[in-house]
Image (cartoon, rainbow, N blue to C red):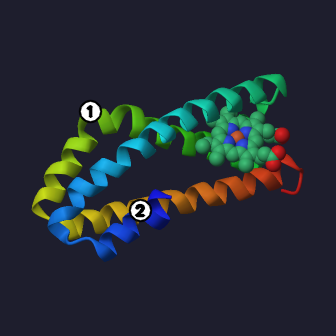
Amino acid sequence: MVTLVLLPGIMRHVPAEKRLALFEMIEGRFAVQARISTVVAGLTGFYMTHELGAWYRFTDPGFWWMHAMVAVWAIFTVVLYVAEPLFLHRWFHERASHDPEGTFGLVQRMHVLLLTVSLVTVGASVLGAHGAI
Ligand code: HEM
């Protein structure tokens, strides 16, 4: 949603000097939802691993999609719970105040990268969980 609708929409239709205020107003609600989803994904993922007795998979490179799930989850956890409150939010606010064009472009590219990695992981995990890879 943020990657495919919010960021491109703001970049296309909102003048550079008004982007930051609008983005920060809307983004807050997505941040809450993203934080909750990340905790749920972690709890359910590790619970399933425990119930399936599937910890051994982490020693087998053939189960790379299990590693990918944990890696994606870890990236979201670190970004949302550590980097954002510690420095990322401040860094974004300051950089976007001076260079909205460049900062929104960079943030959009990072979101596209993360979305791509997440979608590849979801696809591989569905195939992996059903024995197709
Ligand atoms: C944002 C992160 C994550 C995403 C996007 C994700 C996605 C998925 C998907 C798409 C499936 C396949 C469901 C199916 O088709 O039956 C799956 C299954 C599974 N996930 Fe994740 N997951 C994530 C995090 C985690 C974490 C942190 C763990 C912990 C180790 C985990 C453990 C598992 C397990 C054990 C299964 C079942 C595999 C099986 O049935 O053999 N996931 N996940």
Picture quadrant where residue 105 is located: bottom left
Amino acid type at mark 1: Leu
Quadrant of the image where one finds ligand 1: top right
Circle 2: residue type: Leu
Q: Residue at x 21, y 54 (%)?
A: 21
What residue is drawn where x is 59% and y is 54%?
Answer: 118
Question: In the rendering, which numbered label is found on residue 6?
Answer: 2
State whether residue 76 is above or below residue 53: below
In the picture shown, does residue 73 fall above or below 132?
above
Between tags 1 and 2, which lies in front?
2
Helix, strand or loop status at disc 2: helix
| Residue 128 in the image: above or below residue 111 | above
Residue at the (65%, 60%) spot, across then down: 120
Residue 106 seen from this side: yes
Which residue is disc 1 drawn over?
Answer: 86
Left or right: 47 in relation to 42: right
Name the quarter where the C terminus is drawn: bottom right
Task: Say few, some or many: other residues with alpha carbon within 10 Å of mark 1 (under 14 / 14 to 19 / 20 or more).
Answer: few
Q: Nearer the viewer, residue 81 or 31?
A: 31
Label 2 CB less than 8 angstroms from ligand 1: no
Does 126 sit above or below residue 11? above
Extreme residue in the left direction: 98
- The residue at the point 82 percent across, 23 percent down is 51
Toward the right, the furthest residue is 131
Spot occupied by residue 5 in the image (x, y as percentages of width and height): 46, 66
Q: Nearer the viewer, residue 115 or 64?
A: 115
